[in-house]
Structures are given as C-alpha cells and as structure tokens.
Image (spheres, rainbow, N blue to C red):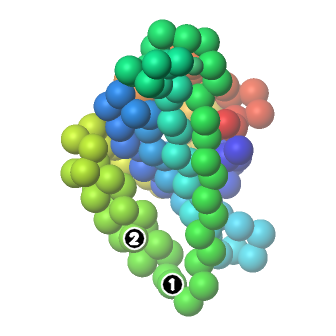
Amino acid sequence: MIHLENIIALWFVTLPKTGDYLAALLRNKDGGCELKLRLREYCQGPDGKGPGRCSCEDTKHWYHVKQGNFTEEQMIESARSVALSIQKQYGGEYCERHRKGLSVEDFVEVLNELPYFTVKKVQIRGATIH
Ligand SMILES: [Zn+2]
C-alpha cells in the first residue's frame, strides 16, 4: 500500500496484456526517501490465452528499495531509468508525475486525470494506492 501523504513522485508504466508497473518515491520518517514498487499481473485466464475473461484478483508483487547512500535526485534518476527500460521492453505507456508543492487532495486529482486511474479512482479518503 502507498500512502499518498508521503509521496514525492510516481511512475506508472502499462504492460499491455500483462499488467502494470508502479513506482512511488516516498518521504520516510527520517526525512529521507524510499521507493515502493508494485508489479501487477493480470490473470491470463484458465487457458492462459489472455486477460479480461475471468474475475480473478490481479496478482501484485511489492518491492521496497531503501535510499542507502543515494541522494534523492539519484533515487529519482534510478526510478525513471527502471520505468523507462520496462516501458521499452513491454511497449506500454510511460507516465511520471511529481507532487512538488501539491496537497494530497490536489495530487489525487492529478492522478485521477490520468487514464490509468479512471476505472478505479484513487480515493481521497485515506489517500492510498493498493
Ligand atoms: Zn483468472
């Protein structure tokens, strides 16, 4: 789960017929940052022929990348470079949004304006992405 009140920036890549990839750079308690990555895989159906033909829950894999000795700028560069290489490999769409000075409410609006979040709108209440 990603708490949007801590978000600095977000990357989203569609993986056509496969799922999607999401990376969120989050402010942590020490004032540093960390990356949370979520890879979603659609169910390919009982015969494995493709998604959208059953009501299975998507499989979500979560990964966590600590800041270590990297600067925030380096974390941004590396999140961007990973997302771009995934985009290149899968031929999907790439999207990058930085929160800058926006409130959670305004950033949620930015996310909901993206085509990727329209089906299941990001909720302002709790302001989380699952
Ligand atoms: Zn299924």
Which quadrant is the C terminus positioned in?
top right
Rendered location of residue 24, percent (x, y) = 54, 53
Q: Mark 2 points at which residue?
A: 78
Find numbered disc 1 in the image and state the secondary structure of the residue it sits on.
Answer: loop
User: What label sits on residue 70 in the rendered view?
Assistant: 1
Q: In this view, does 90 lie to the left or right of 120?
A: left
Label 1 sits on what residue type?
Phe
Q: Which of 121 and 89 is in front in this view?
A: 89
Q: Give SS at disc 2.
A: helix
Q: Do the residues labelled 2 and 1 touch (CB within 8 Å)?
A: yes
For this rendering, which residue is in front, 73 or 104? 73
Q: Please name the residue shown 56% across and 33% down the image.
A: 108
Rendering coords of residue 8 (x, y %): 54, 57
* Mark 1 residue crowding within 10 angstroms, few (<14) / some (14–19) / many (20+): few
- Residue 39, position in %: x, y? 52, 46
CB of residue at label 1: within 8 Å of ligand 1? no
Q: Earlier in the sequence, mark 2 or mark 1?
A: 1
Residue drawn where x is 62% and y is 74% of the image? 66
Residue at horizontal 35%, vertical 28%? 17
Which amino acid lies under the numbered mark 2 shown in the image of this protein?
Ser
The quarter of the picture showing ligand 1: top right
| Quadrant where the N terminus is found in the figure | top right
On screen, residue 18 above or below 8: above
Residue 87: mark? none
